[in-house]
Image: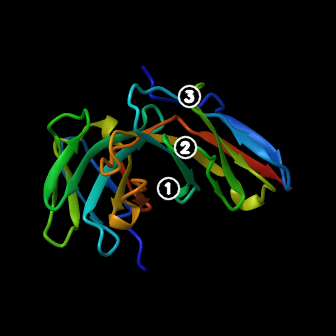
Amino acid sequence: AQKITQTQPGMFVQEKEAVTLDCTYDTSDQSYGLFWYKQPSSGEMIFLIYQGSYDEQNATEGRYSLNFQKARKSANLVISASQLGDSAMYFCAMREGPSNDYKLSFGAGTTVTVRA
Amino acid sequence: KAGVTQTPRYLIKTRGQQVTLSCSPISGHRSVSWYQQTPGQGLQFLFEYFSETQRNKGNFPGRFSGRQFSNSRSEMNVSTLELGDSALYLCASSGTASKMTGELFFGEGSRLTVL
């Protein structure tokens, strides 16, 4: 079974608008971490935001926020005020177990295209 | 602070050959992980090294191997290349600063084409 599911292969968003990228996960661990990474065409994976399973508040990092719904096992990424430079592939990922276990499971990704 | 450096960035090999990819982590990081990215399979974990020891291994055949040196630099090797090994190979490092989150810092990858 897929550990991370991203159901949106591609999305278009108008510049300055907000966009929500969906991510659901599957784990039986009580301790886990959820990540979002951005991959521009250059190939480098850029860390955006992190949410721990025990964090009670939704994580925010600048224009990025993570809508964490633990009971639904979802961790959606919200990008506010989209910019042309936000056009990239976005990956949701999960780390199961302790924080010193650096093995991540990634979703298939969502391609975001920002229109001027 | 220099990021994760991977070399070479691009390479072309033929079936049956072997290839070695190199990764220099961020200074002070002792963990190095490798991932394979293909259009069909997405991002898949290969292995992770910490202080020269392999701590974790993904579900890849024995043709894929790696090692880590005392300066934390890592290499991965793929022997007897197959067409399906064509992929972007990403290296990631992590250190004590990211201990609470397990955040990985990725390089730009080595794009391997097997003909």
Q: Looking at the image, how many numbered discs can be counted on the residues? A: 3
Chain letter, disc 1 residue: A
Residue B56 visible, this orientation: yes
Q: Position of residue A74 (x, y in %)?
A: 59, 31
Q: Position of residue B75 (x, y in %)?
A: 21, 59
Secondary structure under tag 2 reads strand
Seen in the image, is A8 located left or right of residue A82? left
> B91 or A27: which is nearer to us?
A27
> Disc 1 marks which amino acid?
Met
> Disc 3 marks which amino acid?
Lys
Is the Cβ of the residue at disc 2 closer than 8 Å to that at disc 1?
yes
Chain letter, disc 3 residue: A
> Disc 2 marks which amino acid?
Phe
Disc 1 with disc 3 on a shared chain: yes
For disc 1, the marked residue is A45
Taking the spot 26% from the left edge, 37% from the top edge, the residue there is B58
For disc 2, the marked residue is A91
Seen in the image, is A92 located left or right of residue A66? left
Q: Position of residue B68 (x, y in %)?
A: 16, 61
> A56 or A65: which is nearer to us?
A56
Q: Which of the two labelled residues, at mark 1 and mark 3, occupies the earlier sequence position?
A: 1
For disc 3, the marked residue is A73
Of the two numbered discs 1 and 3 in the rendering, the one whose residue sits closer to the viewer: 3
Question: Residue placed farthest to the bottom in the image?
Answer: B1
